Image (cartoon, coloured by chain):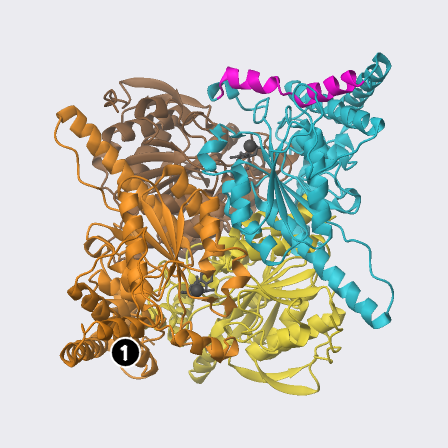
Chain colours: A yellow, B brown, C orange, D cyan
Amino acid sequence: MTAPALPRDRTVQGRERLTLAGAITRGLSAELAADDRVVVMGEDVGRLGGVFRVTDGLQQEFGEHRVVDTPLAESGIIGTAVGMAMRGRRPVCEIQFDGFVFPAFDQIVTQVARLHVRSGGRVRMPITIRIPYGGGIGAVEHHSESPEAYFCATPGLRVMTCSTPQDAYDAVRAAVRCDDPVILFEPKRRYWDKGDVVESVLPKSVPPTGLGEAARVLRSGTDVTLVGYGPTVRTCLDAAEAAAAEGRSIGVVELRVLAPLELDVVVAAVRTTGRLVLVSEAPQTGSLAAEIAARVTEQAFYSLEAPVLRVGGFDVPYPPSRLEELYLPDVDRVLDAVDRSLAFA
Amino acid sequence: MTAPALPRDRTVQGRERLTLAGAITRGLSAELAADDRVVVMGEDVGRLGGVFRVTDGLQQEFGEHRVVDTPLAESGIIGTAVGMAMRGRRPVCEIQFDGFVFPAFDQIVTQVARLHVRSGGRVRMPITIRIPYGGGIGAVEHHSESPEAYFCATPGLRVMTCSTPQDAYDAVRAAVRCDDPVILFEPKRRYWDKGDVVESVLPKSVPPTGLGEAARVLRSGTDVTLVGYGPTVRTCLDAAEAAAAEGRSIGVVELRVLAPLELDVVVAAVRTTGRLVLVSEAPQTGSLAAEIAARVTEQAFYSLEAPVLRVGGFDVPYPPSRLEELYLPDVDRVLDAVDRSLAFA
Amino acid sequence: MLQLLTPEGRRVDDPDLPLHLTDDQYRAFYRDLVLVRRFDDEATALQRQGELGLWAPLRGQEAAQVGSGRALRPEDMAFPTYREHGVALCRGVDPVDILGLFRGTTLGGWSPEATGLALYTIVVGAQALHAVGYAMAIQQEQRQQEQCQLTSSSPVVAAPPAVLAYFGDGASSQGDVLESFVWAKSFDAPVVFFCTNNQFAISVPAARQLGAPLTARAEGFGIPATAVDGNDVLAVHAATTAALERARRGEGPQLIEAHTYRMGPHTTSDDPSRYRDPAELAAWEARDPLLRLRRYLEGQGLADAGFLGEVDAAAETLAAQVRAGCRAIPDPLPGAMFDHVYATEPPSLTEQRQWHEQYLASFENAPGSGGAR
Amino acid sequence: MLQLLTPEGRRVDDPDLPLHLTDDQYRAFYRDLVLVRRFDDEATALQRQGELGLWAPLRGQEAAQVGSGRALRPEDMAFPTYREHGVALCRGVDPVDILGLFRGTTLGGWSPEATGLALYTIVVGAQALHAVGYAMAIQQEQRQQEQCQLTSSSPVVAAPPAVLAYFGDGASSQGDVLESFVWAKSFDAPVVFFCTNNQFAISVPAARQLGAPLTARAEGFGIPATAVDGNDVLAVHAATTAALERARRGEGPQLIEAHTYRMGPHTTSDDPSRYRDPAELAAWEARDPLLRLRRYLEGQGLADAGFLGEVDAAAETLAAQVRAGCRAIPDPLPGAMFDHVYATEPPSLTEQRQWHEQYLASFENAPGSGGAR
Ligand SMILES: Cc1ncc(C[n+]2csc(CCOP(=O)(O)OP(=O)(O)O)c2C)c(N)n1
Ligand SMILES: Cc1ncc(C[n+]2csc(CCOP(=O)(O)OP(=O)(O)O)c2C)c(N)n1
Ligand SMILES: [Mg+2]
Ligand SMILES: [Mg+2]
């Protein structure tokens, strides 16, 4: 056995133009280089570089023991990651597609989310679970879903998502450095979006259990507030732009951290507009949007001039792809909700 | 092999006094006798009669091929039930405790909930999954949870619960006769509650996919509406009673069917009171109560004089049992919320 | 490893599994293999042309699928993965129906009851448990029938149907597949597990998942197992037929591991050059399942130009039908996404359906930009 | 099945697993067995007295637990079920700490790092995967250490720790346990699986779940396996020691199946008379693990009245300590339910904590009925 070449500095140099997927690759690479306890693992993440090529090149660079092709069983992936974390590793697990996280659900809900509390804080679970999620890529069943609600309803987990390459880079680095388990939902239909990425101060400055900003105002507005996350952020921005052309002032807030949910930024925006429309891809019933609506209503009751409206998937399993454009919230559906919100006197 | 003695009529005769658990036993027995496609299956349901004795005596009566002791694996139980249903059986699966449903989560979410839609209606999934749930019995971890939100957020499933022996009897019979999959959450701390049970007209009169009343008004009131389900129904009634002593008129609505959620009864009550407090045991964030709050607010926005308030578990894993009384919503916590609701001018 | 036809097209015999086929039967197998390959190629082409969103090619696995698919009786039930297109053709599924899932027009595509083929299962391994449950239901039915006959003293029923459960080498790591072994043995269910070991789970070689032969694994659960040359349609057919017979006789489950090779990509989205040795592919091409049967037929004088021409023509006709049929598959109506979520639609869903209808209608009323607005 | 001490207390030798113990070592084992049984009995009594909400008795399984627990080195890590109280004692866990979970004062109870014992896992089988992952992490550490040494040319590290994964006969049906076999073999992880086959998963006999011996199942995954008489502390100890050594040498996983019997109920909530044949229990009582070692000691003149008296006294002291300690376990503070849910508490949870504090305080301010109101 020979010592591997020392990995070169993989942090972003200056300003680089990257796809969202490429930014995650760079973030993983930077963390693998920075901390030899980090282990990337999952189905096809090594030699193939992942079905979306998010781990492309990492096995060549860090070796097959740091970037591990696992057998095909999601419970096995997460269950062994739990054991590794118990001995101080920081596993970064990839679930190949949203719809395949469920065989691992037991390990995530009963073990990953609870070992810290079960052990009275003695055992940490710094596990990152990366899940490409959401629709819009014309895929077959189980490849287009938005199962975030299940995880957001599970105390002990942190859940986050991202919408731009810079944000993706920051998010994955923060997730890997977090001492709590983090489910990172990656908006797969934005994987090929390009954007400038600069090395962030974030990973150094955040406390080990922080994930950075929970929410951010992307556009301020006075008539209605839109809230989106992951793939729907762009939809919200486009809708706000279209509405602006009609003389409406629409604010947009992006959620980065979905759990634990901190809604100060949203509530502050709602205090200005009095109207809130939530945009996400999951089936409406039992969605994260329900929680946001319930909580914002409680916190800003007197400010609300209309009930919080939700634009999302319908209460059906994700439809065959020829129907997905009708299922997914788009600019028109968002604007329709804006109209309905404004119709409340 | 000899033909077994023909099972005697197990429907309830006249008016019988039964525990809630015993009423479920009778309901199962009646359905096993009425339809030889019904199969009861799960861990320890046969010889032992289940850890709560809900299936007590059924194996003696119907034989080990109708009341099946399975190997110890929840995914196996539900996955084989799917196959049985494909060939026309009507499996009734027991999950031993709430916290042990997660190994079966994949089969429930990706198979049970979807085979009907996947097959364009050609394959039915008349599977009942019985889950004793909720806290208050001083148990160890994973034995006191309320995971209903996960299932209520899953299109294709029907979810129901019950609160009295009569209701439990009706619910289990309706569930077994339903052509859709039904998750029946049984309030385990009410298993020993006694009540009169009469043979219900329900199983005969409901359509094969109906489960009977979705919600019912247990007590009408004009000041505040309380909504509970399963184990918290009694808490709501007690709270209403206590409040009545102080001159407050509190209505109580019970939910029987938790998904698909039909809220007409609740909305109607809210139109009278303008104030709504939801009481359930699950951690608050992402709970079914969030969905109810969001939806009722949308439908009755102008009627609401206060935001919908939720009384439930905190956003923590179910605590060790010595703390459960503090974790679970009780009469005082409900009355506190009633006060807070009334404090909104 | 059972082999009844060598790569060179030489027929060998196995004392345990005697196989006697008529000339027509040999020819029929060849015809099946050719049609299945042609169908698969056409589907790949349709994907390249944008008619399908995705395709999971079976090239190389024709013998495993035809050999096993033809061992099934009409009353049997097979549980496929997402790659058993050849089995689907053997079961009489309309070839165009196989494409709907990949075109994005349906989540399913055919009637399991009418065809004896369950729907494709995309969640790797989940169907293995369904297969065992289905087999257990057959047992339950049989027992109930026997009881009726005991009381009515009518004659004993015919051999019951058996069940065939397909899964891949990769799937053999999934808890669901392993639990299905436990159940199958525990209830001695009439199920045959058919593992298509095509050497890869996407990019991961079978060796990473299988620390010992899969046959040994099954035997460790008390399930007898047979390894077969999966590129030998005769061996696959003989072994599967025998295993299904055994299941029908009530002697319990069995496993067949068919050693074959996925010659194409995992799906049309895959790039096998990233993980596959070209020399390995070349070695397997020499073991092509069509080639060896053709060599045998030619050696035996069973395949003259007329026969081969007729088979090719049939294949082309099939391809043309599939091409035309695929292009003609209509897009589902918008409201279809609300259909069949429940056996009886709940009011809250009907509300969403109606809202959506009205929402769409508002665009028709107000054509041009802005739609509903 | 490996046996080094017959039920009659006769010592037999096994050529493959020579075991040489000093007189003191024999006596130490006996002492362990007695203390473990006494502890378990006391916990059962405490449950009957209402001090514990539940107890999972190990009676009958003392030899399986002590024999394996004593094979561990301090640096090893063991992953228990919820019944490995004897192992916990061997690992030096404070006996009172074992009770907290069952008393309802904690979800855990001890430091896995300090004791080399992971926390009890109630979800059947989940810990088997943890054990394999932990063993993989040991491998990763070792590899990194070797690389450092290669570059710094310092001497090779000592044998690494090994991992012992406990589970029951029932658990052997769970997907997680079966997947853990796949992983362990695939990575040749330094893990030993220890299956306590106590003949029952609550009411379901092992035969329902095991269509073949569990040792054959493990072997089918490429994992060597050994069956041992689980009521023979010497056999268990010899086999576990050898397997752990093998794992440390980097030769991969192994499985040990210890045949034993749960003499008591599944838990204090259980009623075994519903499913258990009294004759079976009687037969197993004759194979009691304490009895046979005592017979051996007495036969060898290793246990005089002084020794036996000293052991009994130690057991009584332990019981008294446990009794007093259990009663003295304080109830957790109300706020404890918010502790440690996250490594750093998120603001939204702090809000709930504070709300709850104020809510409780409102009762203190307004004592008597109605509380906050
Ligand atoms: C539960 C689950 N995890 C992951 C996937 C993604 N996936 C689809 S096919 C496949 C490989 C399957 O390999 P194998 O079982 O050998 O079948 P093959 O594709 O070779 O026919 C994977 C990982 C999936 N469909 N389901
Ligand atoms: C996933 C899961 N399902 C069900 C249970 C309930 N349960 C607790 S112990 C047990 C039987 C376990 O049997 P076995 O593995 O043989 O261990 P033993 O109790 O005999 O020590 C069951 C079914 C559980 N704890 N976890
Ligand atoms: Mg394969
Ligand atoms: Mg056991």
Q: What range is drawn magenta here?
A: D276-300
Residue at image point 70% right, 50% down: D247
How many badges with numbers are in the image? 1
Q: Would you say D244 lies left or right of C256 here?
A: right
Q: Is residue D281 magenta?
A: yes
Residue D332 picture quarter: top right
Q: Is residue B66 magenta?
A: no
Q: B343 or B145, which lies in front? A: B145
Q: Is residue A140 above or below residue A234?
A: above
Q: A260 or B215, which lies in front? A: A260
Residue at image point 79% right, 36% down: D92
Task: List the single residue furthest toward the top.
Answer: D305
Q: Amino acid at mark 1?
A: Glu
Q: Is residue B341 visible?
A: no
Whole-percent x and y of residue D285? 61, 18
Residue at image point 68% right, 46% down: A117
Whole-percent x and y of residue C355? 30, 63
For mark 1, give the secondary structure: helix
Q: Is residue D294 visible?
A: yes
Image quarter for ligand 1: bottom left
Label 1 sits on residue: C42
Whole-percent x and y of residue C115? 21, 57
